[in-house]
Amino acid sequence: MRPRIRGGFVPFAGIRSAAVRLAIALLVGSVVFALARRGMGSALLLTPADVLGRLWLWQPLTYGFVEASPMGVIFGALVLWQVGGGLEQMWGPRRLVTFALGTTVLSGLLTVALAFVLPPLMLLQFPGGWVMASALWVAYGLSIGRAQTGFWGLPVSGNVLAAIGAGFVLLDGAFNGWLLVVPAVLGLALSAIYVRGGRPELWWLRFQSWRLQQRLRGRSKHLKVVAPDRNTSRNSDRFLH
């Protein structure tokens, strides 16, 4: 069931919801980073050189709960709370958390892999709070599709809402540099693939269906069709094959 939407994205989720916990985690992680920015706080960010060289393998996860500016923290937390709450009502808390963490971590790992092709990515430090927030934003819009929702009082379709979320990422790249939004762009792509039929469980079901069809076809190869002219009467034993 889709939540009713009036004015903004969706009604704010309850304080005990998974969306609220994600937003609180972003606030806490960002404050810890700000307080220890010159120390170990930078270890929370995603730096491909550190992941590969120092084996700081936690960074593809921890960077998702860090933003480096006050506006990034506030806006990212609001999106996680409000948009995440809408997805939680549609998907449930477990699927929401799995999608949020999985998309963020996979975007980070793909960014590390791309650093081999684009060496300038190696030394860049990526906060990932907006990677997670924009992924949820686009996933929510695409999940609604052509149905009407709202964007701060403006009536728009879900697809338009998703395009607005992607537009924020593209504007960030245009003003601050495209390399800095590589994880966010990857997150948008993964969100679109997931919502448009790329969920791992759906692919697994399709694979199982294909295996079952192949097995049934293999078992039926030894069967032969009995021609009608082989049976002369109803009492004939030729009916038994």
Image (cartoon, rainbow, N blue to C red):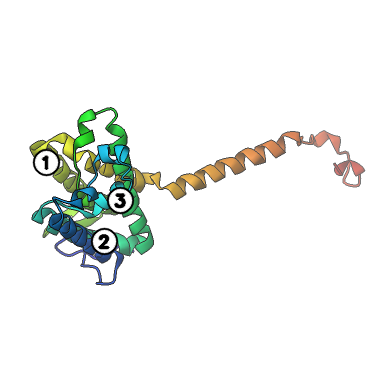
The one of 33 and 201 positioned closer to us in this rendering: 33
The one of 229 and 122 positioned closer to us in this rendering: 122
Question: Mark 3 or mark 1: which is in front?
Answer: 3
Instruction: Give the spatial CA distance, label 3 vs label 1.
Output: 25 Å
Work out whether mark 3 precedes mark 1 in sequence or the reverse, and give the earlier one. Answer: 3
Q: Which residue is mark 3?
A: 61
Residue 117 point in image, percent of width and height: 28, 27
Residue 106 point in image, percent of width and height: 33, 44
Instruction: Give the spatial CA distance, label 3 vs label 2.
Output: 13 Å
Total numbered labels: 3
Label 2 neighbourhood size at 10 Å, few (<14), some (14-19), many (20+)?
many
Residue depicted at x 17% and y 65%: 6
Residue type marked 1: Leu
Q: Which residue is mark 1?
A: 171
Residue 18: name its quadrant: bottom left
The one of 55 and 140 positioned closer to us in this rendering: 55
Work out whether mark 2 precedes mark 1 in sequence or the reverse, and give the earlier one. Answer: 2
Q: Which residue is mark 2?
A: 22
Residue depicted at x 86% and y 43%: 239
Residue depicted at x 24% and y 44%: 46
Question: Mark 2 or mark 1: which is in front?
Answer: 2
**Above or below, comparing residue 164 to residue 173 in the picture:** below
Label 3 neighbourhood size at 10 Å, few (<14), some (14-19), many (20+)?
many
Horizontally, residue 198 falls left or right of residue 175, namely: right
Q: Secondary structure at mark 2?
A: helix
Assess whether mark 1 and mark 2 are in contact (beta carbons under 8 angstroms). Answer: no
Instruction: Give the spatial CA distance, label 2 vs label 1.
Output: 25 Å
**Above or below, comparing residue 130 to residue 226 in the picture:** below
